Amino acid sequence: MTTIRAQLQWRLTILTSVLLVVASTGIYLLLRSAMVAEFDSGLRKEVQALSGLVEFEEDGNLIEFESSPEILSAYGDSPGAGFIQIWNTSGSTVWRSPSLGDIDLPRRPEPLGILRYFNLALPGIPCGRAVSLSCTPRSDIPHPPPVTMVLARDAASLDHRLDTFLAILATCTLLEILGAVWIGRSVVSRRLRPLQRVAEDIEGISAESLYHRLDAAPLAGELKPIVQKLNELFVRLETSFDRERRFSADVAHELRTPITGLRSLLEVTLERGRDPGEYRNTMEDLLAIVLDTQGVVEKMLEMARAERGDVNPRPRKMILSHVLDRAWKPFRQRCGGRNLELHLEIPDSLEIQTDPDIFHIILSNLLENACEHADPGGTVRVQAEPDRSGIHLRITNPASTLNPGDVNHVFERFWRGEKARSETGTHAGLGLGLVSTLVGALGGAITAHLEAGRFSVNIHLPDIPLVEL
């Protein structure tokens, strides 16, 4: 597996090597150009000086180099001597230096006054440099014919200096590359060390240590958002794990109560023989416990489906007051036993466009919660009004035993107020949690408030577009 460190080191090495090689090549080419230009400058001065000594006579003969024995000695047979050859316009050699022996220099005629530099090889001189010049010789006659001169010298010293410089430059470049690789490894390792510590911290986090948070302070600015998102993920995971642990404990607790009740009734019934009426009462009590337990399980299943996104709303237009009457009917007798009254503040023609089955479950659980927990003799008030996107629904009931701090927990699964916990019965604490989940599945929003001793649940449900089949 290729690591980020290895990728950075290789890429940094390649990039540094390319830059150093390009820079060294540029330096070498610039220096070589300067040294060759300096060498050519010497050739130019020399050939221009010699061109001034060439004289043309009327009969076509050349005076070699007037009053210049020192100059001519520089082109003799001595080591390091230069090479000169001169041609007339017809291409015939009219003069050549003794240093050439039987060798001819290449003739390169150019326009008058134009210098042309080129490399050449001579016997015993593999590295030579020459310049060609066409010029007009001195003459007593007007417009004498031009001649072509080629001056050559051994450039071995120039090549030797260039080769030496190239070797030094290549050695320095190689050392710089090695140094850059070492520095790059050190820099990459140092800069990635905080990221490595983060990776080690993440590796050490388990389901039991999700409370641990990663330290983003030593990281570069580009990495801090990633660590912050990871910390947020750990918070969500910790919350989910805690919720699942609480859920398992709550389920065990809620199911233990009815199972204990069933066992107690059965044990008492089996202690001695009883008449048919007593057995019937016991069976009715057992059936009530089973039905209550079934209700808890069904609510848990509904919540699980909603949380998984298995809810598929099938909207339909309905008159809200009709839906409320149907949802209130099962609780009318129970609320009457507690002297509770239902007061509706809903326009008769108010319509809602949503899934009827899901909405019925929402209303049933809200009304059941109000009937079970409202103060006896109070009024359960249901208010609704339309808006541009749907309806606002508000259900309130007197709740003198509810504390302001309890409102933040009413939508949590298996949460119950102190009074409900102290009572034996069917208060599993799932109703409002199920309502909150189903309202979210319908795209709505739900809040709870406690004002002046009255508990209220406020719901906004948008109209769901009808699907044409």
Image: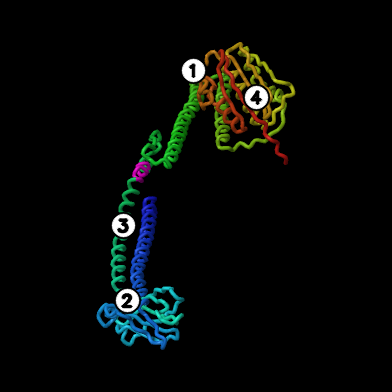
Residue 387 in sight here: yes
Q: Which residue is mark 3?
A: 176
> Looking at the rendering, which quadrant does residue 302 occupy?
top right
Q: Secondary structure at mark 4?
A: strand
Q: Which residues are magenta?
A: 191-198
CA distance separating discs 4 and 2: 104 Å
> Looking at the rendering, which quadrant does residue 154 occupy?
bottom left
- What residue type is disc 1 on? Glu
CA distance separating discs 3 and 4: 74 Å
**Closer to the eye: label 4 or 2:** 2
Mark 1 or mark 3: whose residue is earlier in sequence: 3
CA distance separating discs 1 and 3: 77 Å
Q: Give the dominant element type of the magenta stretch: helix, strand or loop.
A: helix
Q: Secondary structure at mark 1?
A: helix
Q: Which residue is mark 1?
A: 418
**Who's the residue at 37% across and 85% down the image?**
62
Residue sitting at the far front: 140
- What residue type is disc 2 on? Arg
CA distance separating discs 4 and 1: 30 Å
**Closer to the eye: label 3 or 4:** 3
Tell me the quadrant of the picture where the C terminus can be found: top right
Looking at the rendered structure, which numbered label has been put on residue 392? 4
Decide: few, some or many residues near mark 1? Use Cα within 10 Å; few <14, some 14-19, many ≥20. Answer: few
